[in-house]
Amino acid sequence: MVFSSLTFLFVFLPVNFLFYFISKNNTYRNFVLIIFSLFFYAWGEPVWVSLLIFSATIDFFHGKIIEKNRGNWKSKAALISSLIINLSLLGSFKYLGFIISNINFIFNTNLPLREFGLPIGISFYTFQTLSYVIDVYKGEVSAQKSYTKFLLFVSLFHQLVAGPIVRYKDIAEEIENRKITIEKFSYGINRFVIGLGKKVIIANTAGEISEFFLKGEFSQLSVFGSWLGIILFAIQIYFDFSGYSDMAIGLGRMFGFTYKENFNYPYISKTASEFWRRWHISLGSFFRDYVYIPLGGNRKFYARNLFIVWFLTGLWHGASWNFVSWGLFYGVLIFLERKVYGKFLEKIPNIFSHAYFLIIMLSGWVLFYFTDLSDALAYLKIMFGFGDNALISTLFAIKLKNNIIFLILAVLLSTPIIRKIKSSLKQYYKVKEYSYLRIALNAVIIIASTALLVGQTYNPFLYFRF
């Protein structure tokens, strides 16, 4: 089940609210959330609920063992055991087929490919439980004594399948004692609706148009058409993922949980380094805190640490060399910005540094989109004019003409300009008048999104596969 579905919006969520708010206290409400969260996860793949519960159970007891034996070898053994079990599960389900296929290619063997299928959200909840065990070992958080409360942390459907990656220490107090106010609930509704609009109205529209260019015959693709296609994909993936994060944050707030921001207008960046401080913030901070800094960070072996992190960042996104290449692509750029031309980018006018970033960002999305690296390289050749492709095609002209207003709005919405307009409206109108405007806008978004969901067959969620 996904948030941007009619079943979720008009059946699952209202019923969940009903049972949640008729419950007398947080103890009962926790049970309600666990039941609904497990049902939400099981909707698409019932068999994998057992894996989720197993992972939660393993790390619940590892956390207790670590705290009970803090300071002796048993604590470290429990940490190592948790790492081995969690990473083995993730490796078996997500990377085993990839590993075997590469062994066959390198050593010319014929080992049978064994793939168990990819449990939805395994990358997200594995990182969450790992961060919990590591934080307990480091003494940054106390081990949770209640199994049901820990299972709630792992299974919360708001962020279960696509993040943000929520750390236990950030919501530990809210698991124990949370209060829902009208202000928080109102904010949650508004944030959820904005995310729904991002996903259904903008991301789906951009994705559907982009396929005319990205999935067509490369021999018929024009140079301008290749740029338009990847720009549309950049719009799709940003509004798809940030929209889902907005919905998760909004849902969390409605149920009394506060999740950290996951995006901060990444497309206004001027460098690759800045982009990754703004894009998928919860993933970047995870690798920073649990991999990069423990390896030595900036203090020693900087290049080694950097490329390990970016190799893992690419691999986290998928068991394919295009994702690894995409991660290392950013690793190289960040290294060069730090060691070679970063100071130059700071000195030149913003318009030029931003143009630099847009070119490398869009080139990176080509590597991300095409799982076959030969297709990615062929597409990049067309983008930069290394081929016989025409500069402009009829398809490009038609699609641009028909969707120019949508493109302009999508670009504007990916910048802070709307936030500034909203701030101005708050100052101009009285509180009550502004509230009416917001309610009206939310109603329009819900009606438009519902109409599109009823009529559309195209409603993918890109980060489901991660």
Image: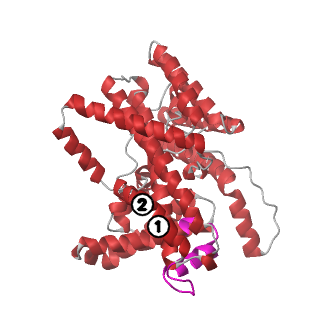
> Which part of the image, by quadrant, shows the N terminus?
top right
Range of residues picked out in magenta:
367-392
Q: Position of residue 111 (x, y in %)?
A: 81, 64
Comparing 439 with 318, the one in front is 439
Q: Would you call the spot at circle 2 few (<14 residues within 10 Å), some (14-19), or many (20 or more)? A: some
What residue type is disc 1 on? Leu
- Mark 1 residue element: helix
In this picture, residue 267 sits left or right of residue 115? left
- Is 306 rendered above or below residue 141? below
Picture quadrant where residue 78 is located: top right
Q: Is residue 383 magenta?
A: yes
Q: Is residue 304 visible?
A: no
Residue named by callout 1:
400
What residue would you read off at disc 2?
407
Image x and y of residue 80, in percent: 56, 47
**Along the line of sight, the residue nearer the viewer: 230 or 47:** 230
Between 426 and 340, the one nearer to me in the picture: 426
x, y (%) of residue 196?
46, 41
Q: Secondary structure at mark 2?
A: helix
Q: Where does residue 432 sit, x and y in percent of width and height?
A: 23, 28
Eye-nearest disc, 2 or 1: 1
Residue 310 horizontal side relative to residue 431, left or right: right
The three-letter amino acid code for the residue at tag 2 is Leu
Callouts 2 and 1 close, C-beta under 8 Å: yes
Q: CA distance from mark 2 to mark 1?
A: 8 Å
Q: Is residue 182 above or below residue 335?
A: above
